[in-house]
Amino acid sequence: MSNPDHAPEPRQTDRWLEPGKANLQVIYILYLASFVIGITGIVGIVLAHLNRGKSEPWLESHYTWAIRTFWLGLLGVFISGLLMIVMIGMLTMILVAIWVIVRTVVGLQKLGRNESIANPQSWLL
């Protein structure tokens, strides 16, 4: 039986969908999982774009970092695919994978310490 004095509580989404630290952790983990599952990186980039610009500045640096990691990594994969023709594409593909993994782990570590990314526009680390 409902009590007329108490309005029903508004439904809240899970924390990991809302902009913030938990959402960024999910994005980083989805990026790492994409090396095994593949499609999860796309889910991660969608979440990053949807939530960018909706949180504190130090978290925004992580959204920028995550978005650039995805798109620059995709560019690296594309270039590596083209370089397969001249037999060095496999080496560059491995280097791109290492680059994505390192950037993702750096992002997770800094997020865990509540630190911003010093230069989120960087191409390197």
Image (spheres, grey):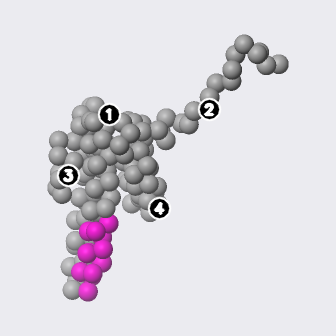
Question: Which disc number belongs to residue 121?
Answer: 3
Is residue 25 visible to the viewer in this orientation of the structure? no
- Foreground mark, 4 or 1? 1
User: Quick one: which residue is furthest to the bottom in this view?
Assistant: 85
Label 4 neighbourhood size at 10 Å, few (<14), some (14-19), many (20+)?
few
Residue 31: image quadrant is bottom left
User: Quick one: which residue is furthest to the top in this view?
Assistant: 5
Q: Is residue 46 left or right of residue 53?
A: right
- Foreground mark, 3 or 4? 3
Magenta stretch contains residue 30: no
Q: Which residue is mark 2?
A: 11
Amino acid under label 2? Arg
The residue located at (28%, 68%) in the rendering is 75
Amino acid under label 3? Gln
Label 2 neighbourhood size at 10 Å, few (<14), some (14-19), many (20+)?
few
Disc 3, SS? loop
- Foreground mark, 2 or 4? 2
Question: Which disc number belongs to residue 97?
Answer: none
- Distance CA(mark 2)–CA(mark 1): 23 Å
Q: Position of residue 83 (x, y in %)?
A: 24, 80
